[in-house]
Image (spheres, rainbow, N blue to C red):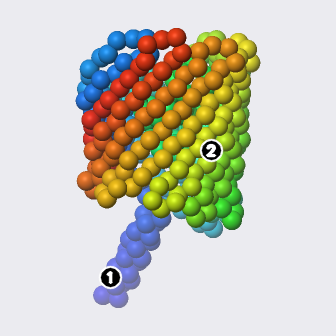
Amino acid sequence: MQSAFKHLALGSAVFLTALGAQAQSSVSVYGLLDLSMGSTKAPGGSSVKTVDSGKMTTSYFGFGGKEALGGGLSAVFKLESFMRAHTGAQGRFDGDTAFARSANVGLSHTDYGTMTFGRNTTALFVSTLMYNAFGDSFGYSPSIRHYFTSGTTTGDTGWSDSFAYASPTFGGVRFGLAGANKNSGSTVSNGGNWSANVGYGAGPVSASLVIQRVKKDGATPVADTRTTQLGGSYDFGVVKAFAQYGEVENLSTPNTYKISGLGARIPIGAGALLAQWGQISPESGADRKTLSLGYVHALSKRTELYAVGMNDKVEGLSSGSGYSLGIRHRF
């Protein structure tokens, strides 16, 4: 009997130890679905009525995890895939990679920050979405459209074959470094990328400065561009104001683009009014001015309805426009 109790105690200890080890590790499944009905007219183009995915936020799903290793150190990973929810297709477009949003693994320490390797989201994209009223909307944010879909900055919102370091916050200040290596013999890259960023956030004030140099992308040839962006916001309570200014130097063309943006988010009950204006002023070429207005209404912490309209004017072309009525759900 005593032997049986010993075996039972030993088995219980092993079982509790296993439970403790499991408690130190976590994996989650998450994502976002954004679907809408509306109309889009590109500057100089014709109006097209569609059902769309990702007009306010690109639809995606992901897996993320963290394992505590002791002494404040943890192993972390992310695997995140874009999708077109209106058709069920994977990626943002045909040919997009399976985990184009993120695919990385690394180490994180409470005192020393986080270093990840693989495919990492760029600091420029994060800064651009943080300091405009429409966030990461490729459909309606003038800031996102002007930096990432208007032929100014080269390089995707995420870099493959990259490393990214993000510091802890020191008295509201944080900084980061990132780089993407050239693949030896690759036909889709002709150099390496790097970026550096510093930010501040305390109370109602937030600001960031990002500098990045791009020589590598998923296309050949890749224009060599250098982008500098300063962004900031101030939350007055009754309104949150946003401002951005950036310059993109295309060293291959050569040409320089000055990109400005002003915006506001005004809380109203369970929703908010959104307004964002932006302008591209190139050294050579046509100016572009974009204004978006919208309203988002929260049905819960995870589900929102939205109505948005946009005017998009390129000098010398008929005005572009668009509107969407949609739903955005996080899970």
Structural crowding at the residue carrying mark 1, measured as other residues with C-alpha within 10 Å and reported as few (<14), some (14–19) or many (≥20): few
Q: Residue at x 28, y 56 (%)?
A: 300
Q: Nearer the viewer, residue 19 or 35?
A: 35
Which is nearer the N-term, disc 2 or disc 1?
1
Percent x, y of residue 39: 30, 23
Name the residue type under label 1. Ala
> Could you tell me which quadrant the N terminus lies in?
bottom left
The residues tagged by marks 2 and 1 sit, at their Cα atoms, a distance apart of 68 Å
> Which numbered marker is on residue 231?
2
Residue 125 drawn at (x, y percent): 56, 37
Compared across the picture, whether 87 is left or right of 77 comes to left
Tell me what residue is drawn at x 54 percent, y 15 percent: 315
The quadrant where residue 180 appears: top right
Label 2 residue SS: strand
User: Is 112 left or right of 321, judged from the image as shown?
Assistant: right
Asked whether, in this view, residue 300 is left or right of residue 62, the answer is: left
**Residue at 70% across, 18% down:** 283
Q: Residue 4: which numbered mark, if any?
A: 1
Splitting the image into 4 quarters, where does residue 279 fall? top right
Taking 111 as reference, is 38 above or below it?
above
Q: What type is the residue that disc 2 sits on?
A: Gly
Kindly state the secondary structure of the residue where label 1 is placed. helix
Residue found at the far bottom of this picture: 2
Tell me the crowding category of disc 2: few under 14, some 14 to 19, or many 20 or more residues within 10 angstroms, Cα based.
Answer: many
Q: Residue at x 34, y 12 (%)?
A: 46
